Image (cartoon, grey):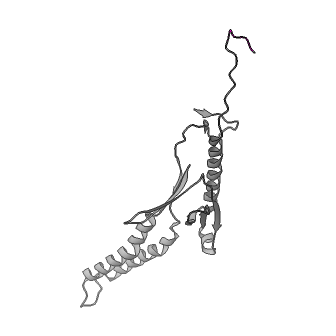
Amino acid sequence: MTQPTAYIGRPLTPAPGAATGELRVARFRPHARRLLWSALLLIAVSGAVGYLTGNLPAPFADWMLWAAATVVVLLLVVIPYLRWAAHTYTITTRRIIEQRGLVARHQSELSHVRGYTIAERRGPLQRMWGCGTLTLSNGVDAPLRLVDIPLVTLVHEVLADQVEVSQIIAHRDSQSIPRLPEGPTPGQPAS
């Protein structure tokens, strides 16, 4: 059951007291700008291996070149990419969740209902790349830092909207639903 709204295009709100499901609003990763050096290194290693294969001096063999290139690519290209891919931020209708870690997964979350302040910081390089850092603090738990967020102003607005909507629904649900006074039953005289 939902409550109709007067605004066209606005989502229907759940009925007072009805359980609301948790929906995913957005899921994103930090900006990929940190992978620039890995990409440039991959191009340079590929070019060097292509040029030096068959052109190495006598004591070195091609397999040594390929082994060294493989180690460099694994350590400086593949592992940074996997670390970047394993770091996600998820905004739902109830909370924001940060998950990170390749082997051991770490998760931190912050509930919208409790409310929090949002501090936005954008350094010169972050402005150039179109990203920024958001710090969410509710005054009780440790602040949650969302580092190198793409489209940081949009994420800031979405978080502010989610906090507002969550608090409105929590306030509305905390109010008791007024009961209608029982009137006289048919056939009984009103007193």
Left/right placement of residue 61 relative to residue 143 reads left
Q: Residue at x 69, y 38 (%)?
A: 7
Residue 160 percent location from the top left of the image: 65, 55
Please identify the quadrant where the N terminus is shown: top right
Q: Which residues are magenta?
A: 186-190
Q: Residue at x 63, y 44 (%)?
A: 169
Q: Residue at x 63, y 52 (%)?
A: 163
Quarter of the view holding residue 78:
bottom left
Residue 74 percent location from the top left of the image: 35, 74
For this orientation, the residue located farthest to the front is 191
Quarter of the view holding residue 172:
top right
The answer to whether residue 131 is seen in the rendering is no
In the image shown, does 85 or 166 lie closer to the viewer?
A: 166
Q: Residue at x 45, y 72 (%)?
A: 39
In the image shown, does 36 or 94 lie closer to the viewer?
A: 94
Q: Is residue 188 magenta?
A: yes
The answer to whether residue 178 is seen in the rendering is yes
Q: Is residue 114 magenta?
A: no
191 vs 163: above or below: above
Residue 91 percent location from the top left of the image: 54, 54
Residue 171 percent location from the top left of the image: 65, 45
103 vs 182: above or below: below
Left/right placement of residue 110 relative to residue 85 reads right
Left/right placement of residue 39 relative to residue 95 reads left
Magenta residues, dominant SS class: loop
141 vs 92: above or below: below
In the image shown, does 8 or 146 lie closer to the viewer?
A: 146
Please identify the quadrant where the C terminus is shown: top right
